[in-house]
Image (tube, grey):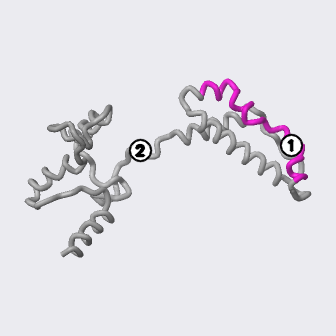
Amino acid sequence: MSSLDREQRSHPALSALPAIHRLLSMPEMREAAETIPSVVLTEAARSVLAVERTRILQCRGEPSIPDKTAICMSALRQARRRMERSLIGAVNATGIVLHTGLGRARLAIDAVDAMIDVARGHSTLEVDRETGRRGSRRDHVSGLLRELTGAEDAVVVNNCAAAVLLAVTVLAAG
């Protein structure tokens, strides 16, 4: 350990920062733990304390030390931000009907309702309902697509790269 590291670790202002377990035992954190996983709260507390340590070590002169409550509140804000959904509804005002950045085509309400109904529990994704044995997830749509298009077979993929790979593979095979 270099002398600079020792000097930084022994900086008197660092000892004024609360330990993570002390932050996590504060009433605000214990209350938040009812809805936010402890791993998220712990990571947020570590992150806030790391920022404070860096700020203290880079400060010229006497650094101000935030009180334990301010650090706790900062960690809680960060934890809540981490728990927010990353996908939210948006209005497509771009003029591009199937905008890839906005989730492409909207789903019909009936389709959304059917997905919600199935997503609430287990489903027959890879079970043949007739035999009760293992089936294929492709069976749910391939028949409908064959009927709709008149193709001899059909498969659904979730992106253009997969579709191109399948098309090139079929063409290369003759």
Q: Residue at x 13, y 51 (%)?
A: 143
The image quadrant of residue 132 is top left
Q: Earlier in the sequence, mark 1 or mark 2?
A: 1
Q: Is residue 69 above or below residue 148?
A: above
Which mark is drawn over residue 13? 1
Where is residue 48 shown, x and y percent of the image? 69, 43
Decide whether residue 13 is among the magenta residues: yes
Crowd rating for badge 2 (residues with CA inside 10 Å; few <14, some 14–19, many 20+): few
Residue 83 disc label: none
Whether label 1 touches label 2, CB < 8 Å: no
Q: Give whichever of 12, 134 is nearer the camera.
A: 134
User: Residue 119's spot in the image, x, y percent?
Assistant: 31, 36
Q: Amino acid at mark 2?
A: Ile
93 vs 174, nearest the viewer: 174
Q: On the rendered image, what quadrant is the N terminus found in?
A: bottom right
Residue of label 2: 88
Residue segment shown in magenta: 6-32
Q: Residue at x 23, y 40 (%)?
A: 109
